[in-house]
Amino acid sequence: METVKGFKDFLGEDAIKRQKIREILVKSFNLYGFEPAETPIVEYEEFVRGDNPSDEAVSDTFKLKDRGNRKLALRYEFTFQLKRLAKNQKLPFKRYQMGNVFRDEPISGNRFRQFMQCDVDIIGSSIKDEAEVLTLTFNVLKELGISADMARSKSVAEFLQRDDLDLVITVCDHAKENCPVFPKPIPQIHIGIDDPALYSDKPDDIVISIFRQTVNLINEKIILYLSESKNLFGDKK
């Protein structure tokens, strides 16, 4: 019997790798004083929709009804549940959570309808707390064998000197005329979005949600472009 489209079994080496990653994350989160949290997979549909019913991720939730004919939905992320968890908690509230989330959306490549999400958040954070999260992230990447030592911003001039670019992606605040112009014949994607930093004065849970929506939007547009341009890169990976 095959799995439902958009869902996948994990066995053997793949399952072992996923378990190892979870162990590294949990160890690191505990080391920095974050407490684990678990939330229901099934929630009331109204709670899942929240204040962003038109958000693409919200519109892709799996909807169902129980025997009492109540409108329910599968969680599509953890952020909307964080608002309930943080209520009446002593600040700063530090929590992490890992688990499966679900989205009834088109699938492509390694994009599935059930996938593992990992969140680590500090509600009521200070500058010191934010720096701690960056340190935590750096250390986790290092233990996973992902080097972040050379990560830094690069100027447009540095990119213009390279001859190994297959694609250029620019992300601007709806201002394409102000984006870098690449004179070389390189395919270019421009993504116009609202700058999420404009919402920095909102409550923490809303700011987190907006930033994640922005990241998801950029990711979806890139995946869509690549899926429609399969012959763009030839035999390159």
Image: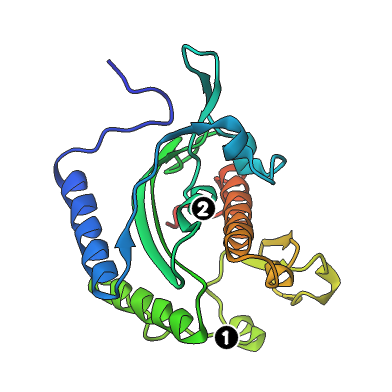
Q: Residue 71 at x, y = what percent? A: 57, 22
- C-alpha span from label 1 to label 2: 31 Å
Residue 123 drawn at (x, y percent)? 50, 68
- When asked about the image quadrant of residue 154, the answer is bottom right
Tell me which amino acid carries mark 1.
Lys
Q: Quadrant of the N terminus?
A: top left
Q: Is residue 15 above or below residue 190?
A: above
Would you name the residue on which mark 1 appears?
A: 154
Residue, x 42% and y 79% (percent of image)? 134
Identified by mark 2, the residue type is: Thr
Is residue 45 shown left or right of residue 121? right
Relative vertical location of residue 46 with respect to residue 121 in this rendering, above or below: above
Question: Where in the figure is residue 43, as x and y percent of width and height?
Answer: 49, 34
Is there any visible trace of residue 144 in the rendered image?
A: no
Q: Quadrant of residue 201?
A: bottom right
Q: Residue at x 74, y 77 (%)?
A: 180
